[in-house]
Amino acid sequence: MKKTLIAGLLTLPMFISSPVWADEITDQINEALKAYEEKDYKAAIDELKYASVALQKLSQAENQKLLPEPLEGWTAQEVDNSGNQMAMSVLGGGSSMKASYQRGEEQVDIEIMANSPMIAMMGMMINNPALAASEKGTESYRYKRIKGIKKVDGKQTEITLLIAGQIMLKVTGNKLKDAAVLEQYLDAMDIGKLKAELL
């Protein structure tokens, strides 16, 4: 058991790609290993907690790459995703990322949530057309055979898709001249890669 845990800790640094974080994470894992060997289990747990948080930040940065580049004529807006993972932890786990794009007064926001208990609630509405229709301005929607719902509320249009039952992809447009741009942003995304990375 001890040898297995030590071997697992030693192999973790091999999966770290960022040099900036690699030193810090490697140091924390090595400190945890040292504490473990000295049977200071509390210190080992504390070091591994710090390493886990750093790894989550690395994972969050990698997940952001799943979001599309702005379409021609649009610019990407800076979005603070620092609180996303903490919020997801409070809500029961999973991962979340956001991006925002602007063209004049028009704005498109994209949010991806994966492996969260909250997805089950949205899935109930997506999988039940009658339930979706009961909400004003909401209707069932399909994008390339992916089930979803579309909601129109004044100048805001929102498309939510449920991918493989565990990934929620939401694209929201505000003050759009043509709501078709929402599907253009969906077209710009690699759904296959999304599933491969997040499931």
Image: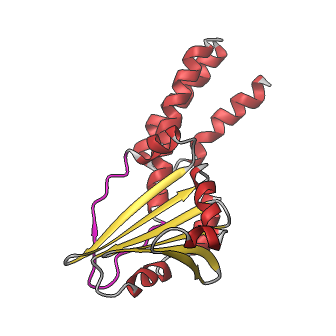
Q: Main secondary structure of the magenta part?
A: loop
Q: In this picture, which residue range is highlighted in magenta?
A: 66-82
Q: Nearer the viewer, residue 1 or 112?
A: 112
Q: Quadrant of the C terminus?
A: bottom right
* Residue 152 lies in the magenta-colored region: no
**Rendered view: 56 above or below 151:** above
Image point 52% across, 25% down: which residue?
47
Image point 53% across, 22% down: which residue?
46
**Rendered view: 183 above or below 36:** below
Relative image position of residue 55 (x, y in whole percent): 51, 42
Relative image position of residue 21 (x, y in whole percent): 43, 42
Image point 69% across, 28% down: which residue?
6
Q: Quadrant of the N terminus?
A: top right
Q: Is residue 25 visible?
A: yes
Relative image position of residue 133 (x, y in whole percent): 56, 73
Q: Nearer the viewer, residue 86 or 70?
A: 86
Image point 56% across, 28% down: which residue?
48
Relative image position of residue 103 (x, y in whole percent): 24, 78
